[in-house]
Amino acid sequence: MTEDTILRKAIPLEDLISVLPQLEDINYWLNLNPNSTISDHPFADFSTLPKTDDKILDKYALQLREEGYFQTNPLIPIATLQEMNECINQVRKAGLPPMFALVYDVFYQAFGYFDSTLSGILGSNYKLVPNFWVYYIDAVDTGKGFEPHRDAEYANTIDTNGMPTVLTIWITITDATPLNSCMYILPLNRDPQYADAITDLKTPANQFALEDIRALPTKAGILSCWNQYVFHWGSRSSKRAPEPRISYAAYCQRGDIAPVDDVMIDIPSVVDFSTRLGLICRGLYRYSYASFQHSEKAQPVLEFFHKHKANLK
Ligand SMILES: [Fe+2]
């Protein structure tokens, strides 16, 4: 995404300013969600979790090459999804952007369920590129996800075999349906401008046939992955949807290429409370800065973001 299109998520500024001081206190978060933990080692114990078998990995890799994306079966247990849902709901009730739910272990623990899939596609030393966003699309007629775009933050991330070296990972916490803003995607083999987009990140997508658009209704607990250049979007939601669309996203990259961004996280590794606050502030700054950059009132929030982003260095 180019700068003028990634900076577009509005956040409730005044609510945020009033609570800034307490956000640095881990006990505030533990009290907000007493059933959830905040430890230093959220990626522990992957070895006992189920593995994706090679035939399924081959199928995913083929679809990535041919269409630019793949989706797993539901991988995250219902109890874990419920915990994520509860964390996000309590954070919203406190007047905060849902991104702050990423202080809790459960969102990192979930990577255990994806580990064998991501290792199979990106290599065993793959890394998390923590460009996080947490989505909460209300079941109302005005809700929607990101408008049509290519992620396109990094050029030339397709290798000589046609495989991506950087993947967007999108994790559904509730079912995503056509009524609550599920994903729509243009498979790369239906996009006449796709090849240009790999090298030119500003390549538009305006030459495809409407019938080539594919809806991706997605059950909760599924890992969806796509490359940097496929054209996609979250649809308009409806008040007729039975529940909001709740999900979160980040990137992963191969470990044997140079870091594509300024922060990269090993899986597993220590991701303590201070690091998480830094990641949350980095994501909010990166993807919502435009919503308040022209407002003098935003200064305390910007200072807070900069202070905690600095902890990542
Ligand atoms: Fe995207």
Image: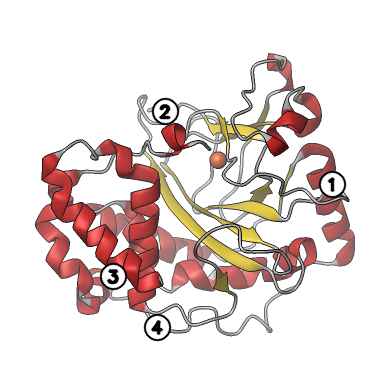
Q: Earlier in the sequence, mark 2 or mark 3?
A: 3
The answer to which of marks 2 and 1 sits earlier in the sequence is 1
Q: Which residue is mark 4?
A: 39
**Is 169 left or right of 142, judged from the image as shown?**
right
Q: Report how far apart the C-alphas of labels 2 and 3 lie in the structure.
A: 29 Å
Q: Quadrant of residue 313?
A: bottom left
The crowding category of the residue bearing disc 2, from other C-alpha atoms within 10 Å (few below 14, some 14 to 19, many at least 20), is few
Q: Which residue is mark 2?
A: 240
Q: Which residue is mark 3?
A: 33
| Amino acid at pointer 4 | Ser
Nearer the camera: disc 4 or disc 1: 1
Element carrying mark 3? loop
The crowd level at tag 3 (other Cα within 10 Å; few <14, some 14-19, many 20+) is: some
Residue depth check, mark 3 versus mark 1: number of the one nearer the observer: 1
Task: Note whether 117 is above or below 195 in the view shown.
Answer: below
**Looking at the image, can residue 145 be seen?**
no
Point out which mark residue 257 bears. Answer: none
